[in-house]
Amino acid sequence: MHTKTILSLVLVLGLAFASAGCTETQEGAGIGTLAGAGIGAGIGAAFGAPGLGAAIGAGAGGLGGALIGDQMKQKKEQQQQLRMQLQEEQQKNLQLQQQIQSQQRPQY
């Protein structure tokens, strides 16, 4: 396979991941693949094997990107959980305030 063909294939696959409704892990893998392929091709070209460099870079970048994307997903889920807990606590606080106010009103 020619270097341009490999790079074009990697680019198309990366764009497909990035543009579709993907999870954070998939988006990270797509972006990492593109970045890794570009960097790998540049390094590989210095040694006379840009296609091999692109392939290795794409694999390493895809794996690294997937790991980063997965961490982002976990962080997002934790934040959502904390938001829900905060809302529950705020609701409880409001109910307690209302109870206190109702007890402080003079009874006629």
Image (tube, helix red, strand yellow):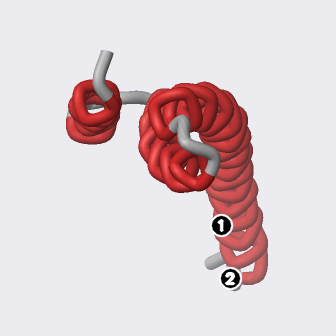
In this rendering, the label closer to the viewer, 1 or 2: 1
Q: Position of residue 95 (x, y in %)?
A: 67, 59
Q: Which residue appears at 65% of the width and 69% of the height?
A: 98
Residue at image x 75%, y 56%? 89
Q: Indicate the amino acid at tag 2.
A: Arg
Q: Quadrant of the N terminus?
A: top left
Identify the mark at residue 105; answer none if there is no mark: 2
Asked where in the image residue 36 lies, by quadrant, the reply is top right
The disc at residue 28 is none
Q: Is residue 101 visible?
A: yes
The secondary structure type at the circle numbered 1 is helix
Left-right relation of 7 to 37:
left
The tag earlier along the polypeptide, 1 or 2, is 1
User: What x and y, as percent, mark residue 37?
Assistant: 48, 41
Q: Residue furthest front?
A: 48
* Residue at x 52%, y 49% (from the top left corner): 45
Which amino acid type is marked by label 1?
Leu
Q: Residue at x 53, y 32 (%)?
A: 58
Residue at which label 1 appears: 94
92 vs 6: above or below: below
